[in-house]
């Protein structure tokens, strides 16, 4: 029986027969359609996905002319963070432009969140200016809203993760609501500094990481930034496929945030004024790559269908169908990219 | 798309600044550069276009525009405002 080289969601190599791959695809598509209450992939899409997964060769690609663009998160520090190369962030950004062909690059504080960056906004502005003078590609300032950092002892509000198990529900909800205001203030503060120095945009990375309050902070900050600086682009990248209801009652524009999937998340991001949306689908490391990419494509296709702004899918460690591992295998990474471009018609990665 | 090897940076600018989806962004840039959409991803075509219009090259030589110089030309060719260009002009006393 013929089997095909592929991987599991933890990146381990496995060999699967045709019917195993096709069953994983259809199971994952059905599950995603049920969870998200969205249309499943068509049979044509699933057949095309099978072709992509089983294509010969290590790396696969899209047809000439179908290429899309890239954005990043903390990419101007990744050469140091991941490999230990002692390059200043502006130098790293130039490497991405002139050696790796990046379409854009972002500058992020080493402690990659807006709260930590705020007291260093002055020196961050200087690094931004150095980069802007030398770079041609769009240069964004990126960070995480990271609502958890606003809790004691690192921040001013009570820790709702401790209050909830103690049954202090009202106090936990109030703490999250207070943290939202602090986070919005910090994100708008940084955005103003970066706008004045000439930055092309702001990237809010992992919006929703601490649940619905975290997502609300990103939405409110985006709205404020786009109101104050209408020509500053804002990319809003999510933390997960599903907004956790740590608060449960928070809304934006009358829509409850808890429980939203990508096709609903993008609508709110658009309403808040975001110019790019970073959709996320999480990887299950116990399932095959075929299962994971099929599930990702089902969610992302609907997200892309309903969106009026560019959708840049997060395709990296543990998201977008990619296995949960430090070194991304090119075989599945290129297949995930090809599937998302050709089946989901995405605008970027 | 290949960044400054092709037209990836410019397509990216239209997405970020104007929220254009990929097809619309590519068409906008292609029309402004006077090339086809297919040509935007072709480094052979785009190297000549970028050099001729001063839009910056991935492998620059000394007398070709780099950095803010290239962005000044990109803003003109695409008919857009680039924040860093405007700030540069103001700080340099050019406006």
Image: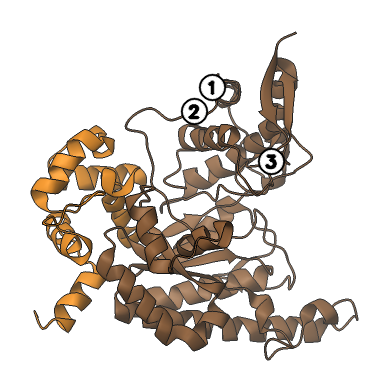
Q: Badge 2 sits on which subunit? A: A
Measure the alpha-carbon separation of dots 2 and 1.
7 Å
Q: How is the image coloured?
A: by chain
Disc 1: which residue: A57
Label 2 crowding class (10 Å Cα cut-off): few <14, some 14-19, many 20+?
some
Q: Residue at x 91, y 81 (%)?
A: A166
Q: Is residue A230 visible?
A: no
Q: Is residue A194 left or right of residue B62?
A: right
The alpha-carbon separation of the residues under discs 3 and 2 comes to 25 Å
Residue on which disc 2 sits: A60
x, y percent for residue B21: 36, 48
Pick the quarter of the image with the N terminus of chain A: top right
Residue of label 3: A32
| Residue with the most extreme bottom position | A156
Tell me whether circle 2 and circle 1 mark residues in contact (CB < 8 Å): yes
**What is the crowding at mark 1: few (fewer than 14 residues within 10 Å), some, or many (at least 20)?**
few
Q: Give the residue drawn at x 25%, y 71%.
A: B84
Mark closest to the chain's N terminus, 3 or 2: 3
- The local secondary structure at tag 2 comes to loop
Mark 3 nearby-residue class (10 Å; few <14, some 14–19, many ≥20) = many
Judged left or right of residue A175, residue A208 is left
Q: Position of residue B73 (x, y in %)?
A: 13, 59
């Amino acid at each position: 029986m013929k089997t095909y080289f592929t991987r599991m969601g933890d990146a381990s190599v496995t060999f699967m027969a045709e019917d195993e791959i096709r069953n994983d695809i259809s199971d994952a598509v059905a599950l995603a359609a049920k969870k998200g209450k969205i249309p499943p992939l068509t049979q044509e899409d699933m057949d095309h996905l099978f072709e992509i997964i089983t294509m010969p060769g290590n790396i696969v690609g899209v047809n000439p002319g179908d290429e899309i663009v890239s954005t990043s998160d903390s990419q101007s520090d990744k050469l140091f963070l991941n490999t230990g190369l002692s390059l200043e962030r502006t130098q790293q950004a130039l490497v991405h432009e002139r050696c790796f062909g990046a379409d854009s690059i972002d500058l992020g504080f080493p402690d990659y969140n807006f709260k930590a960056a705020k007291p260093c906004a002055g020196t961050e502005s200087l690094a931004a200016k150095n980069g802007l003078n030398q770079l041609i590609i769009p240069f964004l300032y990126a960070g995480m809203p990271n609502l958890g950092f606003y809790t004691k002892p690192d921040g001013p509000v009570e820790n709702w993760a401790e209050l909830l198990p103690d049954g202090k529900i009202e106090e936990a909800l109030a703490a999250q609501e207070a943290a939202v205001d602090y986070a919005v203030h910090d994100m708008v503060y940084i955005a103003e500094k970066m706008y004045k120095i000439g930055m092309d945009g702001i990237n809010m990375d992992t919006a929703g990481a601490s649940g619905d309050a975290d997502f609300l902070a990103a939405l409110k900050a985006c709205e404020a930034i786009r109101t104050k600086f209408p020509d500053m682009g804002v990319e809003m990248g999510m933390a997960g496929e599903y907004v956790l209801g740590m608060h449960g009652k928070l809304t934006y524009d009358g829509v409850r945030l808890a429980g939203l999937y990508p096709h609903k998340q993008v609508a709110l991001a658009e309403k808040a004024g975001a110019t790019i949306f970073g959709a996320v689908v999480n990887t299950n490391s116990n399932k095959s790559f075929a299962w994971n990419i099929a599930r990702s494509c089902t969610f992302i296709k609907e997200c892309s269908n309903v969106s009026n702004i560019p959708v840049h899918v997060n395709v990296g460690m543990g998201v977008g169908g990619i296995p949960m591992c430090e070194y991304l295998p090119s075989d599945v990474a290129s297949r995930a990219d090809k599937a998302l471009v050709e089946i989901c018609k995405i605008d970027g990665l | 798309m290949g960044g400054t090897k092709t037209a990836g940076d410019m397509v990216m600018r239209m997405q970020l600044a104007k929220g254009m989806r990929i097809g619309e962004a590519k068409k906008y840039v292609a029309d402004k550069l006077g090339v086809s959409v297919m040509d935007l991803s072709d480094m052979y075509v785009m190297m000549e276009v970028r050099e001729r219009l001063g839009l910056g090259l991935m492998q620059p030589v000394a007398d070709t525009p780099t950095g803010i110089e290239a962005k000044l030309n990109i803003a003109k060719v695409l008919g857009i405002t680039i924040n860093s260009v405007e700030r540069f002009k103001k700080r340099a006393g050019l406006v």
